Image (tube, helix red, strand yellow):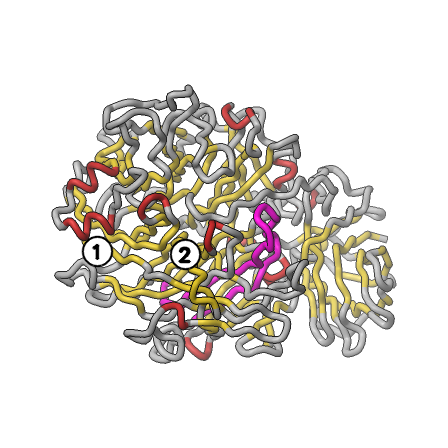
């Protein structure tokens, strides 16, 4: 939980793209789980994907608790950590307990798991009577066991002496199939396990607050199976990056033992050009490289960087490390591989005072099964409390002998971290972190908002990127090293404003989980209350989304009407075109069907489902195509109506099944409007409708197409 982007989603009340009954496939693309009475009657998402809802008996989080980060077990159980129901970073809890939830989709079983303090209590309050529960920082399956590890973040509320929430523990499934807490350790209990005084004070400082530096996100290493855990705080709750490695022992279902194997603390860092201005990197995320081998297990961290006085964050990078499980010195087991790095991309927005832009920051990381490191980016707000909604390109650092992070961008032993700087450039402020351009940069995510998470479907090499808006974008990789290629699938819009209709002080949010063996992405949808809102202590709706990634990588075939006057509306983003082409920058890859959020209302005659929230438009440059698979029940004549916009001279060429152009239509300039093609004929069976942007006639954007039988 600690160090995540603390933002609020705007209450999107504008009506987005609308779907029709005809667009709903035989099986849903997505399913939304929740409690009875909280599921919206959408049927179709704003991106035109079919949606089913499932009211689960007994689905109920504890009052004041929101669904947070999740994990999938080998049998498909979704383990969800619960956090406070208000974005205040844990300092003022909204619940008096600590909770994990296990959901088994096949049996539709929802099981809350309540944790206890080290004194055996299920609840805690402050002397003033306010809730003094604790949040789950992360959950992670432990390799070689049936257990799921969890961290407790902000478990230091001042409720009573000698009564502490756990900072680390494990849950397992019991003999009757229900989940239980197998072992747990509070901060004092974990400290007591560390014999070396120096290691004890660095790994689990007791100064100020008893939280072991706020154990946060967990990564399971592939060879040693040790757990790397990010620590957001240093001693006395001061932000200061630290990394902890724990080794779990014991039988597969517990009880378990835990041993502190290694600790790394970031040294002092000063701001570029100002040796008296100290920066504090607070480690937010840690991700393991699955190709690691004994003695050289790699992992990467992303961090927030704060100037003195806990002021506005500054651009934050990533850094790669190596772990040697056989090292005898716990202070030498973790060593830097790369310098702290930034991509060198520049923010879209500018400082309203100085007029300067800043380097974008890395937000999320993921190593794929080949060892390529993917990194999502976002802009940085210029003032505390300002929304951070602007996105950035998706960076890929390719694996291999020539990997930039261990080569040109590698860490030099003895060199101070403060010396790694991205210099000032015309109109751009200098920043801490070496400029290290990735091997590949995918531009499509830049227009979909701030990056929020990355997760992989390993069997198909598909990376799903999740954005702050809840949008999901699948990207499939092919090849390796200098020969990597990419396909970008259809963006998925979950319709958050319809799931959680805007209300005073209440907002939706999303948190990722993982991908199951059936290629389905799972992520939680939260209800959160604004600071000071008493709603935060009540039971607010929480949901779980399931999205079929394979259906986002290939467009469903739309069935055209066989009756004169009937029509079928197809959202532009539901195209079969997934190709990318080289851009102008080094390693840049641009989506042929470049999607961007669109708030345009669809044809009012197709309003069977009114979905709030943005859908997408698709921009098409010169010389490229969009393809839409369709099925025709009987031979007939059709006309396509385009909702599109372009510049003077923009035209759409229409053809079917690769044959010559059958109609060319001029596109309205400068605003979305509807325009119709000339009639054309199709025989019965499967066809592919192709829309082309001829040289000099491209640069148009498409919201949707409506195909009408004449």
Can residue 631 be seen?
Answer: no
- What secondary structure is marked by label 2? strand
Residue at position x 23%, y 54% in the image: 225
Residue at 30 percent of width and 32 percent of height: 165
Q: Is residue 598 shown left or right of residue 53? A: right
Question: In the figure, residue 415 lies in which quadrant?
Answer: bottom left
Between 507 and 244, the one lying in front of the other is: 244
Residue annotated with mark 2: 280
Depth check, front residue: 651 or 482: 482
The residue at the point 42 percent across, 74 percent down is: 480
Q: Residues within 10 Å of mark 2 (few under 14, many from 20)?
A: many
Q: Which quarter of the picture shows residue 622?
A: bottom right
Residue 572: give its label.
Answer: none
* Rendered location of residue 688, percent (x, y): 68, 63
In the rendered view, does 297 fall on the left or right side of 7? left
Query: For the N terminus, which image quadrant?
Result: top left
Q: What percent of the width, then of the height, locates residue 92?
A: 45, 32
Q: Is residue 392 magenta?
A: yes
Q: Does 330 sit above or below residue 250?
A: below
| Residue nearest the observer in this picture, 180 or 215 | 215
Instruction: Decide: is 436 above or below 38.
Output: below
Q: Is residue 36 above or below residue 397?
A: above
Camera-near label (2 vs 1) is: 2
Secondary structure type for disc 1 = strand
Label 1: which residue? Answer: 262
Percent coordinates x, y for residue 251 in the rendering: 15, 41
Circle nearer the N terminus (2, 1): 1
Span shown in magenta? 369-397
The secondary structure making up most of the magenta span is loop
Residue at point 58%, 68% (across, down): 346
Mark 2 and mark 1 residues within 8 Å of each other at the beta carbon? no
């Amino acid at each position: 939980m600690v160090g995540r982007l603390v933002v609020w989603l705007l209450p999107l009340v504008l009506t987005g793209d609308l779907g029709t009954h005809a667009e709903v496939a035989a099986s849903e693309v997505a399913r939304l789980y929740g409690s009875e009475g909280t599921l919206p009657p959408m049927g179709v998402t704003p991106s035109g994907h079919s949606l089913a809802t499932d009211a689960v008996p007994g689905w109920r989080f504890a009052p004041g608790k929101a669904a947070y980060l999740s994990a999938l077990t080998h049998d498909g159980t979704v383990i969800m950590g619960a956090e406070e129901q208000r974005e205040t970073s844990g300092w003022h809890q909204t619940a008096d307990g600590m909770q994990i939830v296990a959901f088994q989709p096949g049996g539709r079983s929802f099981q809350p798991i309540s944790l206890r303090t080290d004194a055996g209590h299920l609840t805690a309050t402050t002397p003033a009577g306010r809730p003094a529960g604790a949040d789950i920082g992360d959950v992670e399956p432990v390799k070689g066991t049936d257990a799921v590890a969890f961290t407790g973040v902000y478990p230091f509320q001042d409720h009573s002496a000698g009564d502490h929430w756990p900072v680390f523990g494990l849950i397992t499934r019991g003999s009757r199939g229900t989940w239980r807490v197998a072992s747990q350790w509070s901060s004092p209990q974990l400290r007591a396990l560390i014999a070396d005084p120096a290691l004890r004070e660095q790994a689990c400082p007791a100064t100020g607050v008893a939280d072991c530096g706020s154990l946060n996100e967990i990564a399971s290493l592939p060879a040693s199976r040790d757990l790397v855990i990010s620590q957001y705080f240093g001693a006395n709750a001061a932000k200061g990056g630290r990394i902890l490695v724990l080794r779990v022992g014991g039988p597969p279902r517990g009880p378990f033992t835990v041993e502190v194997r290694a600790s790394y603390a970031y040294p002092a860092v000063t701001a570029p050009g100002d040796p008296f201005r100290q920066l504090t990197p607070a480690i937010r995320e840690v991700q393991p490289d699955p190709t690691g081998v004994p003695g050289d297990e790699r992992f990467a961290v992303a961090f927030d960087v704060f100037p003195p006085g806990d002021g506005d964050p500054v651009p934050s990078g990533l850094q790669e490390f190596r772990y040697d499980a056989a090292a005898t010195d716990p202070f030498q087991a973790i060593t830097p591989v790369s310098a702290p790095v930034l991509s060198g991309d520049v923010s879209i927005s500018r400082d309203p005072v100085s007029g300067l832009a800043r380097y974008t920051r890395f937000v999320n990381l993921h190593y794929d099964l080949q060892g390529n490191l993917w990194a999502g980016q976002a802009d940085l707000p210029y003032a505390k409390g300002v929304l951070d909604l602007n996105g950035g390109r998706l960076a890929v650092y390719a694996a291999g002998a020539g990997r930039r992070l261990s080569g040109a961008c590698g860490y030099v032993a003895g060199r101070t971290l403060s010396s790694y700087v991205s210099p000032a450039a015309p109109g751009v402020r200098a920043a801490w972190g070496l400029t290290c351009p990735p091997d590949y940069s995918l531009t499509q995510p830049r227009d979909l908002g701030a990056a929020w998470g990355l997760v992989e479907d390993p069997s198909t090499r598909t990376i799903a990127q999740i954005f702050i808006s809840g949008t999901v974008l699948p990207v499939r990789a092919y090849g390796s090293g200098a020969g990597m290629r990419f396909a970008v699938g259809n963006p998925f819009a979950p319709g958050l404003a319809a799931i959680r209709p805007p209300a005073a002080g209440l907002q939706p949010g999303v948190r990722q989980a993982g991908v199951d063996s059936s290629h389905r992405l799972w992520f939680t949808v939260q209800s959160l209350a604004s600071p000071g809102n008493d709603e935060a202590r009540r039971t607010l709706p929480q949901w779980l989304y399931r999205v079929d990634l394979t259906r986002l990588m290939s467009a469903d075939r739309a069935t055209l009407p066989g009756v004169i006057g009937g029509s079928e509306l197809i959202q532009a983003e539901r195209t079969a075109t997934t190709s990318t082409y080289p851009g102008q920058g080094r390693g840049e890859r641009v989506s042929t069907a470049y999607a961007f959020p669109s708030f345009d209302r669809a044809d009012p005659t197709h309003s069977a489902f009114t979905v709030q929230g943005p859908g997408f438009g698709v921009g098409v440059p010169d010389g490229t195509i969009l393809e839409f698979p369709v099925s025709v029940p009987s031979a007939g004549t059709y006309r396509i109506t385009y909702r599109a916009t372009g510049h003077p001279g923009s035209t759409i060429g229409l053809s079917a099944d690769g044959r010559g152009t059958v109609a060319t239509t001029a596109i309205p300039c400068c605003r979305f409007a509807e325009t119709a093609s000339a009639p054309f004929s199709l025989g019965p069976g499967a066809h592919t409708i192709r829309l082309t942007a001829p040289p000099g006639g491209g640069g148009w954007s498409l919201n949707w197409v409506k195909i009408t039988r004449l």
